[in-house]
Amino acid sequence: MKAKVRQPDLARAINSAQRAIESKSVSPIFWHLLVEATKTGDLSITASGLERTITTSVPAIVLAPGAIAIPAKTISEFTSYLPDTEELLLTFENPKKLVLHVTCSRSHVDIKGIDSKDFILHEMTTTGADVVINIPARDLADGLQQLLPSVALKADFNAVLGGVHFDLSDEGLNLCACDSFRLARRLFTVPPLGKNCTATVPGHIASDIIKLATDKGNCQIAFFLGRQLLRFWIGDSVITSNTLHGLFPDYRAFLSRLEGHTRITVDSAELIQAARLAFAVCHGMNNAIETFFSDGEIHLKAQSDFGESHASVACEGNGNDAHYTVNGAYLIEAIEAAKAEKLVIGIGAPTDPMIFRNDEKGFIQLVMLMGGASSREEGDE
């Protein structure tokens, strides 16, 4: 193998791919990056772990194709210390010595590696996929950003709650996440394909996609149901993710029960300011914020050993004096996640969660109550 590559391109490829590195793995292969110069004139960097594989390809002058796997930390640190004006020459010529020579204008390093045949690698094609769809990469990243707060941090009892659920049907592509207190869904419009596919990927895959979706192109998503894989093409990177095992909650049935609730429209900026003022009092204590919905106003109240806070916000609609108590952190996250100038809040039966909607983006989030709902007079007694 012999190839020339610019330092910024190599550094970007390494930084993108090594998100899949599993530093605590007992297998050394998972500490390595596969460096491959292809006949098409690209240099690809691949990292693979138990749950995911990430490959990023960058332009290079390929003088001789070839591949070798080298320690990720070594090549990452060496490359990061070089100025971005450098051009690097990567050379691997002796298969028996398994050493990658990296040379630039005033520096040189020999990195011991392992045979590329020992590296765990998935095919980077759509061959054998059950369904392939395209979604604007920035829109997908925006939707995943809305869902991440609802991904369970600890999902020992049900692994799928630690991920994002992909549900493809004639309705479109639903992305959903939920923990014990929240449920969030984002709907994307895609052409009907006449086939339903569902899969759940780990939450950190969503974080990878958000980081890599920096351009305005499309993200291609391929469902490999038999192999329990989802594959994402984003710009010059490819992410292959194993899917999580388990039955994801029936979010459709749950959402359908909440249709027809009273809708209140409020300015998001005003509501989040009021919520933060209230949360400043109760943060670190019980985190509880009381919300009262009257005709044309939403009142927020919080109290703790630190003090007491009251705020009110004008709204459109009559909340019929409904009174809810919610976790202040979840309230703020739900308002932020909706990304709506005018937020729609749904209120209903005393045991129903609060509903936050941005219908323009097909987004809805539910937040469970810390106490039941009642009339304002009952709540003040």
Image: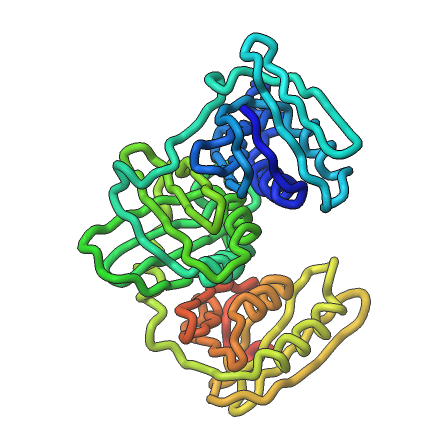
In this picture, residue 169 sits left or right of residue 370 = left
Quadrant in which the N terminus appears: top right
In front: 173, or 295? 173
Q: Quadrant of residue 12?
A: top right
The location of residue 196, given as percent across then percent down, is 23, 51
**Which residue is depicted at the point 57% across and 45% down?**
153
Q: In the picture shown, does residue 283 fall above or below 300?
A: above
The location of residue 93, given as percent across then percent down, is 57, 17
**Which residue is depicted at the point 27% across and 40% down?**
129
Q: In the picture shown, does residue 375 fall above or below 134?
A: below
Q: Residue furthest left?
A: 194
The location of residue 285, given as percent across then percent down, is 73, 59
The location of residue 372, given as percent across then percent down, is 51, 67
In this picture, residue 259 sits left or right of residue 240 = left
Q: Residue furthest front?
A: 63
Task: Look at the image and tell me whether residue 184 can be seen.
Answer: no
In front: 114, or 252? 114
Q: Residue furthest top?
A: 96
In front: 290, or 2? 2
**Which residue is depicted at the point 68% across and 82% down?**
311
Quadrant in which the C terminus appears: bottom right
In front: 37, or 249? 37
Q: In the picture shown, does residue 339 fall above or below 94?
A: below
**Which residue is depicted at the point 31% across and 53% down?**
133
Task: Look at the image and tell me whether residue 244 can be seen.
Answer: yes
Q: In the picture shown, does residue 179 fall above or below 98?
A: below
In this picture, residue 327 sits left or right of residue 344 = right
- Colour theme: rainbow
